[in-house]
Image (cartoon, rainbow, N blue to C red):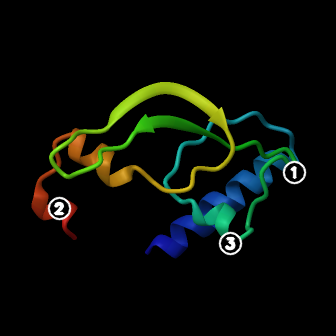
Amino acid sequence: APASGIAVITSALQRLAEIKCKVVCTTHFLEMFSLCLLEDCKNGIKAVQMSIHAPESNDDEAVPLFKLKDGVASSSAGLICAKMAGLSDKILGR
């Protein structure tokens, strides 16, 4: 369940930050920040996001810009990335 994944990754990141371990973690679990489980720029946690040009319609494709910018993303591009990776519409529709 997503809640379990959010709990596990949040706990792991909190512990790694406590022991001052430098980690790069990628996730689509924005809830870690929106539910205030983690705070950006506090306790050793620093959020950055990858910039993409999101499609304006389903016919267009997203364009990764390969540029990191500071802050927590406002939405996940997980489905866009999954579509670009070739996952079937049946799986994407779940």
Name the side, left or right, on which 93 lies relative to 48. Answer: left
Image coords of residue 83 (percent x, y): 22, 47
Q: Amino acid at mark 1?
A: Lys
Q: Which residue is mark 2?
A: 91
Image coords of residue 34 (percent x, y): 66, 67
Image coords of residue 62 (percent x, y): 31, 38
Q: Which residue is mark 1?
A: 42
Secondary structure under the numbered disc 2 in the rendered image: helix
Q: Earlier in the sequence, mark 3 or mark 2?
A: 3
C-beta proximity under 8 Å, tags 3 and 2: no
Residue 9 vertical placement versus 80 (above, below): below
Which quarter of the rendering shows the C terminus? Answer: bottom left
Secondary structure under the numbered disc 3 in the rendered image: loop
Residue 46 vertical placement versus 7 (above, below): above
Q: Residue at x 87, y 51 (%)?
A: 42
Secondary structure under the numbered disc 1 in the rendered image: loop
Q: Residues within 10 Å of mark 3 (few under 14, many from 20)?
A: few
Q: Residues within 10 Å of mark 2 (few under 14, many from 20)?
A: few
Q: Earlier in the sequence, mark 1 or mark 2?
A: 1
Residue 53 vertical placement versus 5 (above, below): above
Q: Residue at x 69, y 44 (%)?
A: 71
Residue 35, numbered circle:
3
Residue 58 vertical placement versus 54 (above, below): below
Name the side, left or right, on which 34 lies relative to 28. Answer: right
Q: Disc 1 and disc 3: Cα gap in Å?
A: 15 Å
Q: Disc 1 and disc 2: Cα gap in Å?
A: 37 Å
